[in-house]
């Protein structure tokens, strides 16, 4: 990879110019170049043409990524550092994460004069990202640096003319996927805009931004929470707000445009295609980016050619669309079709019918394949729906929902199981996956939860008890209480999911149930893992009370010896 393929500011920007704001402190281009030189040297000593990159700090992540490319190395982007992910990617891990062999670049010589330095030592500079395959095995997708730089140049061409040079880029989306990375990091790096390294987990945190012009990179889930805040204020000027990952509702876009005094822009693309189209609210149709050609196949699905793809071949999507006088309209997904008892059922059609009901504010459906095939529905109710549910109870309300759909859907498409949620289980990209919905219907379902805090050996999870009412069934009809055995089960299952625990569960110690847990209690589960003791300590607590706690011990697995008869 030649030096000419670097983002221009890395070669030409003044050493004193600001490249990043990290923990609110400015980072100059001189400091960035020195860190890149040191990271290159540290990476070269690994003698590895491929490394796995995971770092929650956007600045450190970008330093490692550019250093890999300058060395001719390929960086595999890991979404997390969980044991299963580390087992799936048995390569040297880089960045501040569990299992890392290189957590910082202190072993290199931090000499800005050494950047960009000699040519690449390895042969294939690039990046690998992963998408979910239909078989459940992630698909590996390679991206060359030049593809990301072309996208950055394209975004600057379309949206950069009105942005002052001092515009700061801030994000409420992670930087390790193909929306957060190009929009939060590569575009501003290419164009020379300062980047805010902090990841804003909650919309309220945007109030900490300073009174400078900003571009906000966000998701529909975060923007919806922003629109629902009772009050919000920030001294920052938001010149533009970009959203991607899932459809952005017009009402949410309108509310955020007013709250932030911003221009709302929705981006359409995928991991494979990068950016394809954009639309500007209110009511804008989708318009392709310069150089992108769109067409429809025989099934009404989009296909496209783009300068951001590896070649000029047509790329086939599964998104259905129509072309109107004012532009493109997306109409759904062709692959959101489930086979129920041998018959095809369109999940989009079920959700459209449900959203037409006054009781429903938001819905996701999924197929569930057990003793029988069936459709399940997770629903966020409107005020009307919540009032009816409280008045007549879940069994009668389920029956009423099915009856309301019977006129517009075939009997086989009617959902047979229902969960009523206070909020959808959105992931960091603002998406709700089919697997997330199916998990809500597990026989021993875990409650919906969010990770409030996490380190290598400790996690704090915020639980949504009211969205897991099946756990309270039978305990007790007039006073629902979360059973102690369920609390222990949740703690053990979540600990085994997130910590590299060796051995089988063997014993419980110091179990205390201090207060009963009710569906409306706002509770957090804290898990602490002590690898040397093979022990997990758990506690359920709120800001005002402690509910339960205990210790779980794990023994080494017993090896079964083969016998000869």
Image: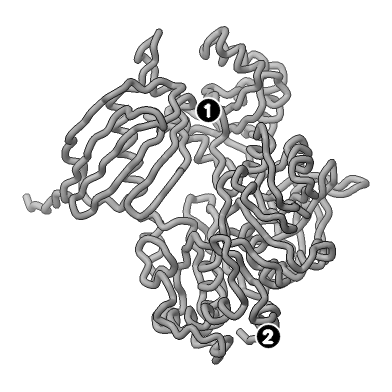
Picture residue at 67% right of the left edge, 67% below the top: 194
> Residue 175 appears in which quarter of the rendering?
bottom right
Q: Most extreme residue toward the bottom, as rendered?
A: 118
Picture residue at 57% right of the left edge, 24% below the top: 415
Label 2, label 1: how far apart the Cα atoms are: 56 Å
* Residue topped by disc 2: 4
Q: In terms of sequence position, does the residue under pointer 2 or pointer 1 come before the other?
A: 2
Q: Most extreme residue toward the right, as rendered?
A: 325
Badge 1 density bin: few <14, some 14–19, many ≥20, Cα 10 Å: many
* Left or right: where 249 falls relative to 415: right
Whether pointer 2 and pointer 1 mark residues with C-beta atoms closer than 8 Å, the reply is no
Picture residue at 52% right of the left edge, 84% below the top: 123
Q: How many marks?
A: 2
Asked whether 293 or 274 is in front, the reply is 274
Q: Position of residue 193 (x, y in %)?
A: 70, 68
* Residue topped by disc 1: 374
Picture residue at 20% right of the left edge, 49% below the top: 534
Label of residue 283 in the image: none
Asked whether 346 or 483 is in front, the reply is 483
The vertical placement of 549 against 211, above or below, is: above
Q: Most extreme residue toward the left, as rendered?
A: 565
Asked whether 57 or 554 is in front, the reply is 57
Closer to viewer: mark 2 or mark 1: 2
């Amino acid at each position: 990879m030649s030096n000419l393929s670097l983002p221009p500011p890395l070669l030409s920007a003044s050493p004193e110019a600001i490249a990043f704001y990290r923990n609110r402190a400015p980072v100059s281009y001189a400091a960035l170049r020195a860190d890149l030189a040191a990271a290159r040297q540290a990476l070269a000593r690994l003698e590895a043409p491929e490394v796995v990159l995971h770092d929650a700090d956007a600045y450190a992540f970008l330093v490692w990524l550019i250093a890999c490319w300058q060395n001719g190395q390929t960086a595999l982007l890991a979404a997390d550092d969980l044991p299963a992910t580390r087992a799936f990617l048995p390569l040297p891990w880089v960045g501040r994460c569990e299992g890392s062999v290189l957590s910082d670049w202190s072993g290199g010589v931090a000499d800005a004069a050494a950047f960009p330095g000699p040519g690449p030592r390895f042969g294939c500079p690039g990046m690998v990202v992963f998408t979910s395959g239909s078989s459940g095995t992630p698909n590996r997708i390679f991206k060359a640096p030049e593809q990301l730089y072309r996208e950055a140049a394209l975004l600057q061409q379309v949206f950069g003319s009105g942005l002052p040079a001092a515009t700061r880029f801030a994000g409420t989306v992670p930087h390790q996927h193909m929306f957060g990375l190009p929009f939060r990091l590569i575009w501003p790096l290419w164009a020379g805009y300062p980047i805010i390294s902090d990841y804003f987990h909650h919309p309220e945190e945007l109030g900490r931004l300073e009174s400078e012009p900003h571009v906000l990179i966000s998701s529909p889930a975060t923007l919806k929470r922003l629109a629902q805040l009772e009050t919000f204020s920030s001294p920052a000027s938001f010149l533009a707000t970009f959203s991607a990952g899932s459809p952005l509702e017009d009402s949410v876009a309108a509310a955020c445009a007013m709250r932030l005094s911003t221009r709302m822009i929705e981006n359409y693309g995928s991991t494979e295609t990068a950016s394809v189209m954009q639309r500007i609210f209110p009511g804008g149709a989708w318009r392709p980016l310069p150089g992108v050609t769109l067409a429809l196949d025989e099934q009404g699905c989009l296909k496209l050619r783009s300068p951001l793809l590896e070649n000029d071949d047509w790329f086939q999507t599964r998104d259905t669309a129509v072309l109107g006088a004012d532009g493109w309209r997306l109409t759904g997904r062709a692959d959101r079709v489930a086979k129920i008892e041998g018959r095809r059922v369109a999940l989009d059609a079920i959700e459209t019918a449900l959203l037409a009901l006054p009781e429903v504010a938001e819905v996701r459906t999924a197929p569930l394949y057990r003793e029988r095939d069936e459709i399940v529905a997770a629903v966020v109710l409107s005020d009307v729906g919540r009032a009816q549910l409280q008045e007549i109870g879940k069994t009668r309300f389920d029956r009423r929902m099915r009856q309301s759909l019977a006129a517009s859907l075939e009997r086989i498409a009617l959902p047979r199981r229902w969960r009523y949620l206070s909020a959808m289980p959105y992931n960091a990209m603002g998406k709700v996956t089919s697997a997330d919905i199916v998990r809500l219907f597990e026989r021993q379902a875990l409650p919906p939860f969010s990770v409030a805090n996490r380190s290598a050996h400790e996690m704090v999870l915020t639980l949504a008890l009211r969205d897991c009412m099946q756990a309270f069934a039978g305990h007790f009809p007039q006073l629902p209480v979360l059973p102690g055995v369920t609390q222990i089960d949740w703690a053990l299952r979540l600990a085994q999911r997130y910590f590299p625990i060796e051995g089988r569960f063997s014993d419980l110690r110091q179990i205390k149930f201090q207060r009963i847990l009710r569906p409306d209690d706002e509770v957090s589960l804290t898990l602490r893992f002590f690898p040397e003791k093979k022990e997990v300590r758990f506690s359920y607590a709120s800001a005002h009370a402690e509910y339960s706690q205990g210790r779980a011990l794990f023994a080494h697995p017993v090896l079964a010896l083969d016998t000869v008869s």
